[in-house]
Structures are given as C-alpha cells and as structure tokens.
Image: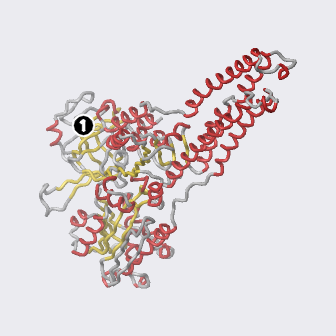
Amino acid sequence: EALTQLMKLQAKTAIKIITAHNTNTNTNTNDAKGIDLWNPLKDSYSEQVVPIQHIHPGDVVKILKGASIPADGIVLHGELTVDQSMITGESIPVLKVPGDDVLGGTICSETGTVDALGGKDDDKNKNHVLTAAAFVRVTGVGADSALSQIVQLVQEAQSRQVPIQNLADSIASIFVPVVVGLSFITFVAWYSCCVSGIVPRDWYQGESPATFSLLFGIACLVISCPCALGLATPTAIMVGTGVGARHGVLMKGGETLEIASKANVVLFDKTGTLTRGKPAVTDFTRVGSDDFLKNLMDPSDSNIPVDDYLVWLLGSLERNSEHVLATAIVKYAEQMIEHLLDTKPFTQPSNFVAMTGRGASGLIHGKISVAIGNRAFAERLNMEITPEVEQCMQTLELEGKTAIVAGINGTICAVLGVADELKDDSVDSVRYLKKMGMDIWMITGDSKRTANAIARELCLPTDRVIAEALPNSKVDLVRQLQSEGKIVAMVGDGVNDSPALAQADVGISMGTGAEIANEAASMVLVSGRVAGTCTALNLSRVIFRRIQLNFLFSMVYNVLSIPLAAGVFFPIFHTRLPPTIAAVAMALSSVSVVCSSLALRLYKPPDVTSQGSSIFQKRLPRILRLRQQYTQVCQNTLESTTIDDEETIEFKINIV
C-alpha cells in the first residue's frame, strides 16, 4: 500500500517544450548548450502534453502553478517556489531561481519568469516582464529520480526480515512436551508401583492397575492443558489494541506491541510531528512611529490603536496572496484585531503584485502603499533597512525564524517573525519519554539553525539533532542505531519519513500526516498529538507486562495443579482428582487469564502535560501582545532558565 501511494505522487503527464533545437518529440536530441541559451520570452517554441514515459534527460518541460514537477531537473528560466516537504519536510516553500535543482514529485506553489529588459547587470533599469510559468531542463527520470529512490528505500525496508521471539511459542514449545512426558511418567510410575506391590491393593479395589494408573496420567494431562498459555497473548493483544484505539493509537498486529515494549530510542521528525507543520507569526515588532502611522489614518479611524491599524493594513494586503507566509499573517491579523474586524473588515487592495518567493505589494484605499516581504524584496523596493530593523531581523534569524519586513509608503514600519511552532505537548512529551529511559533524537530536512532553535526548546543536546537530512539519511541513522543493538522507534508524518518508518523496529506515524506514512508505519496516532507517542509506548509496555503476568499465572497454576493431579498427595488423603474435575479446573484457569486481560480496559494514558508548561503556553501570546503594544516605550527581555530536573521556568521582564 505504501509503495502504491508513493507511485501516485509521480506526475502522469508533462508539458514538453519543442524548440528549434529539438524538433523530434519522440527522441532526445536537445543540444544542451543551445537549450541553456534558449529564452522563452524571445525565442519561439511549441508545447505538447506527453506521457511521463516520453520525457528524457535533456528535455525541457514547462511548470505551471500548482502542478507536480514531473521529473528531477535544473531551472532554466523563471522563478518558482516549490513545496519540498515530500523530500525535506520543510513547511515553507523554497524559492528556486535559474540554476537551482528541483525534484520530481514536489509541488510548484508559485511561478514567474523575470527578465530585466535593460540587461542582467543593469540595476538601474527596473522594468521587468513577468510570465506565469517556469521552465526546467530534465536531468533525472525513472529510476534516477529522487521519488524512485524513496520508493526503493521503502521497498528495501519492508522486505527485511525482523527476528521476533514469540514468547508464547517459546514457552509452549518447551511446556507441551514436558507435560506430555510428565503424564506418561505419572502413568508408568503408578503402574510400576501397583505391579510391584508397593501400592496396596485396597487403594485401587474394583479397578485394574492399568486403569488406576491411567486415570492419574489423564488427570495430569488434562489439568495441564496449555489453553491458558494459548490465551495469554491473543486476549491481552485483542483487549490492548482496543484500548489503544479508544485512546487514538491504532496498532497493526501483536508483533508491534512486543517490539515497542522494548524500544529504547525514539527518533522524531520535526516538521508536522513535533511542530504544527504550518508557519505562524510568532513575533511582531513595530518600528514605525505613532505620528507616521496616524497621518495615514482617516479621521473616522482616529479611535483605532496604531498597532491595530497597522495589522489591519497588513491583513488587507496579504488576504489576496496564496503563499503560506501570507496565510500565516492573515491568520495572525484575524486573531489580533478580531474586535476591530467586526466594524472595519479587511478591504480589497488595488495594484496588487506578488513577486515569486519574495513578497507582495499593493495600494490600500488607492493611496497607502503596503509592501510585505523578505530582505531581498525590501532592497528591490528601495526600502531602507535601519540598524534597528537589521537587529530585529538578525535576532529572529538566529532563533531559526523567517524575518519579514512590512513597509508603508516605502518606510519599514514592522518586523515579523514567522516560524513553524512546536505543538503544545511536544516539550512535555519529550520530557516524559526521557523519564521512561528513552534516548531522544530529532532528525529533519530543515536548516541547522532552525533545527537547533527547536532543539533548545525541547532541551535536546546538539549531538542528538540531525539537520538537512534527506530520506536516505534518516534510513541510515535508523540502521546505524540498530547496528548498535538499539530498538528504534521512528515518529514521522511525511512522505520523506516513510522509508525510515518502514526501516525502524517500530514506525509511528501521525494520522494527520501523509497517507503514505500511515501505510509504512506499524502504529498510527489518529489525533496527531505528540503525547500519543507516550501513550503508544507506555501502553505497549503495559500490554506486554500483562502478557507476561498471564504466562506467570498459567505457569504457577500448572506447577501447583500438576502434582495434585498426578496423585502426589493420594497416599495421604486417599483422594484422587477425577479427569472431569481436572477439566473444570483447566477451564477456570483459562477464564482467569481472560479476566486478567480484560483488566487492561482500566488503563489510563499517562498525563504528560505538566501544569507549569501549560501556564507558559497560555501566557506566551499575552507577552507577545505586550511587546507589540509597548515596543516604542520599553524593551522587554524574556529570560528562561532551567532550575532543576522538573524544568521550572522563571520569567523576567526588564522595562527600560
């Protein structure tokens, strides 16, 4: 199933470009040098939609917004932002310019071809021609593509043989022959004693020595029937998996439980697993003066706070963009000025222009120019980056966040920090897993700066953080840990995690992630909460301990009942255990094991969320709003210090 889902990511067709350098559409005759000099804005060409099987290295394909890139290649002309989460797990699309590599199966979020009419190096000429497409020269198709390599990794991982010791089979393989042997020995011993005269005849009056002895052997065999042993595992697994499903943990088979109960290493993917997987505005610092912004406001808006008006301008502009960062800004604006939007809803900007991978600009009310974008976008629009703005941006970038500037009429008035925030329960879940004795790792395709920033929040040492990891790097880490004798649990949610999920001893996927990851994993967390990992591993241990308890009860029962059925106490009490009573006693032992397994229904998942952490998460938005509203009159410093093992956090705000 996982392989089938992976293959569905491959584009079925491609828009092939036919140029003067390639007039044969069935074979690859492109001249690489000629193609590199080809310009779609000046040179004629034709297009043809062809099956992906007809695309070869050297061909040029056209990429449209929202389309899946059909093959690995190099950007020839145009710019595009690419959703690479399938490969790297990055939540923010990456800008690709001519000369950059793109991977087949990734999604094109935005496209645009920019051509400076005055020449490539003519910075004075700001006239540009924009088209809504990008052009890519194919470098890898079929087995050479990145997607095919992911498929191969999953296939290799799923085909590996994992040695699993089945406890029930191991015990039964020894217990059954021993019991049969004991029953036979019981019969022979009693028969020999009867024949030799050791056993008085009045002990078996009315019966032959063979019948008398045989009843002891049958009772011994019946009462030690391994039904309880046979029920110990399946009943516990059946009840335990039902309990797991009730708490949002879907388990695929009993073997998973046995392995998960022994796991001692947990590898976490970052994006979408530990984090929300969607960028959000985490910082908002206004650098524009009150007077500057008040002069822009209409008299009817004079009662609106300056910060709220600025946020309203940004939300009005970004509401027209489909970029994930624009969506984050709009959501932030809706949360921050919810009360204002009831009376002053967002307005429609005019002259709206979105520059691929850089930012957007437009006019509000036809007179207020609003521009939001990255550093390159600000420089392109000749917005001055003051030392104060530069310091804010550098601070955010050191924290692994994306720094965005907002300009009003050519003046930067605010600096925003956008990041993929940790889920509410990530910190507490990692802490709980550490207390369980787990060795915690984080592996991500994001940059080292972003990965280290998240690791600091999770209190993970840098030697347990792997950044800029491709799918094969994750598989290599899992194999390395397994070669060291570790039992590895991999937690992920994306296509890029599926090979590692299949390779790990226990693969745990987020139910809110890619279907491919769910197919490759052996456990699925329906809610997508990190705390579900704690529940899954804790429940696996509880279930396996219950199985062991069931075995222990069965063994103790047999140790006590076999001597009784074998007649060890007959010389004292002159009472024999009939085979029918032995059968009833055997059935009662099975009922006891079933009742023991049913007790698993009383299981309660661990409470991993500490009160202190919850208070911190609830108060953080208020601290951000405080910084937003009073940044012109005070400087807020937020200091967090680890006090002890319970990680008590102290807040300190210095007002200058």
Q: Residue at x 45, y 34 (%)?
A: 4
Q: Residue at x 33, y 50 (%)?
A: 445
Towards the viewer: 75 or 517: 517
Residue 76, image x, y percentages: 21, 45
Above/below status of 11 relative to 639:
above
Towards the viewer: 531 or 367: 531
> Mark 1: few, some, or many residues within 10 Å (few <14, many ≥20)?
some
| Res 214 visible | no
Q: Tell me, what colour scheme is on the image?
A: secondary structure
Q: Quadrant of the C terminus?
A: bottom left
Q: Secondary structure at mark 1?
A: strand
Residue 296, image x, y percentages: 34, 80
Residue at image mark 1? 139
Towards the viewer: 220 or 63: 220
- Quarter assignment of residue 229: top right
Towards the viewer: 124 or 97: 97
Residue 303, image x, y percentages: 44, 85
**In the current view of this chain or complex, which residue is farthest to the right?**
206
- Report the number of numbered marks: 1
Q: Residue at x 55, y 42 (%)?
A: 251
Q: Residue at x 27, y 73 (%)?
A: 412
- Quarter assignment of residue 580: top right
- Quarter assignment of residue 368: bottom left
Above/below status of 225 relative to 65:
above
Left/right placement of residue 186 relative to residue 542 reads: right
Going by the numbered disc 1, the residue's amino acid type is Thr
Residue 141, image x, y percentages: 29, 34
| Res 191 visible | yes
